Amino acid sequence: MPSSERARQLTLSSCQPPTDGKGRPFSLDGINPSDKPFGSDDKAADKAAVEALAIELDALQNLFYADRRFKLLVILQGMDTSGKDGTLRAVFSRMSPLGVHTVGWKAPTEPERARDYLWRIHQQVPAAGEIMVFNRSHYEDVLVPVVNGWITPGQASQRYAHINDFERMLAETGTIILKFMLHISLDEQRERLQERVDDPAKHWKFSMGDLEVRKQWDAYQKAYEALLGATSVPHAPWTVVPANSKTHRNLMIATVLRDALQSLSLRYPTGDPALTGLKIV
Amino acid sequence: MPSSERARQLTLSSCQPPTDGKGRPFSLDGINPSDKPFGSDDKAADKAAVEALAIELDALQNLFYADRRFKLLVILQGMDTSGKDGTLRAVFSRMSPLGVHTVGWKAPTEPERARDYLWRIHQQVPAAGEIMVFNRSHYEDVLVPVVNGWITPGQASQRYAHINDFERMLAETGTIILKFMLHISLDEQRERLQERVDDPAKHWKFSMGDLEVRKQWDAYQKAYEALLGATSVPHAPWTVVPANSKTHRNLMIATVLRDALQSLSLRYPTGDPALTGLKIV
């Protein structure tokens, strides 16, 4: 099947691993990173749609903050240069910083390594009315150690179970959880890394270690397939986002997010009945 | 059966709820708070034994700290005046404060109530080599709301599951968990509360709210029976401690703790081989 036809066939549900609890690895083969299931043929129109969505999201976030019945945790995962920072800027930067927070997770520090790997994560979960966006997350703990053989397959399975338990507890105490895997191709990464090398203004985004991780590309894809299958659950589904096109990536994430917020039937809390008819004198 | 005979029959295992995962409420009827399964007829000898154990525990804690393979979480629960503070002083105060930490949990603050009830708890779990003692704990969240009807039985069961999941994750990442329910009688509490009222130097330990909680005694005992049955698991067992006698309470807790630490085969880490034969010049 030519790629252009496949592109038209990709839908949201084909980008979401089954949440049937069977935990089978979710193959990324069927998802071409250049496909645009949420895009049109008109890039300018897509860009305008992202802008419109960002404004819509701002209004929804305002309501979400006032409503205070829910917490929202958004997780962004993906290989280097897959566009996690760019998503933050394009999709979330219109919202009020009062109610939207971001954490960029790095390698754990000494005190963090001295506790379980969910310890530092739990400290940063959103409060009632808040939106928290994780740039990388606890899913790094079932990627880096798996790819490098630091933990056994049995230990990886144990961690999937810990993560599912943890996220279920968060969901059962009012947290909406949305997880996005930004899916780019090996070629696209080469181009984006080259850009960082060629442009001195982008050197700060590049480290030689990125090349080592690039060499492990296939092992990382496999580790992603395993975690997508094991940890996509009804209360915390994964969405794989074809992300070779930045505009499409933003459009898809903003749409899924908007739909999730709209489905909550958010409302402003009812005021004190004493306010009805009150005359301020 | 006269109470003196029953006293001789109480053993450690009869004070530990089954960890078979069936979750049936554990009846406290069989455990007379005045019994002394770990005591002798000689109070002075028992006191000397506690002292000896405290010194033994100090040495074990030192080794535990150096070994750094484990974390130890000790949870003390019990009704007002059941002796949680007294246990801290008698059993833990010989240890180096470097490796032993304590948190006394109070009613949650506003930012704590805005997250799940395990959020603040997770922040205080012990690091590698550390001993953390919780004076009250997340178990208050399946006592106070249950007794006051703030959560449904279904929500209580959900919380038992959250707690079991959470503690299993801690155990699987190297935490030893020991949980003690300090079991006193209604009469003993009356005497201890009266003492606090009569002695101005103890007024700070008393609040009128304690009398409201005392009125709910039976409901609290029932809530304890439910949680003891639901959350006593192989990786985090409960021990019910007959605690009308303070000396017996200390003796029993110190012994269980000592035995748990001894079973870990703690060792000093092996030094750098380069140290062998090294001459400092």
Image: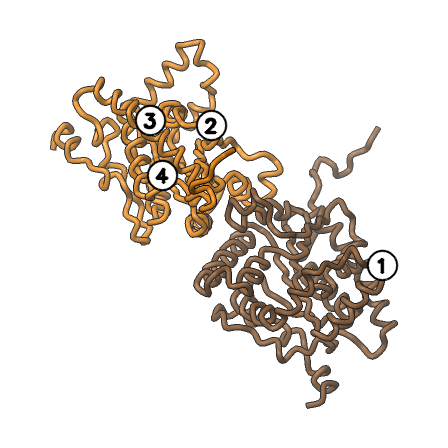
Chain colours: A brown, B orange
Kindly identify which numbered label has been placed on residue B224: 4
Kindly identify which numbered label has been placed on residue B54: 3
Query: Label 1, on which residue?
Result: A200
Query: Which image quadrant is residue B254 in?
Result: top left
First in residue order: circle 2 vs circle 4: 2
Kindly identify which numbered label has been placed on residue B106: none
Labels 2 & 4 near each other (Cβ < 8 A):
no
Q: Disc 4 versus disc 3: distance between alpha carbons?
A: 28 Å
> Residue B208: horizontal and vertical position, in percent?
47, 20
Amino acid residing under circle 3: Ala
Amino acid residing under circle 1: Pro
Q: Is residue B116 left or right of residue B37?
A: right
> Residue A12: horizontal and vertical position, in percent?
67, 73
| Chain holding disc 1 | A
Q: Using the rendered image, report if marks 3 and 2 lie on a common chain.
A: yes
Task: Report the quarter where the N terminus of chain B lies.
Answer: top left
Labels 3 & 1 near each other (Cβ < 8 A):
no
Nearest the camera: B216 or A92? A92
> Residue B227: horizontal and vertical position, in percent?
37, 43
Query: Label 2, on which residue?
Result: B97
| Chain holding disc 2 | B
Circle nearer the viewer, 2 or 4: 2
Labels 4 & 3 near each other (Cβ < 8 A):
no
First in residue order: circle 4 vs circle 3: 3
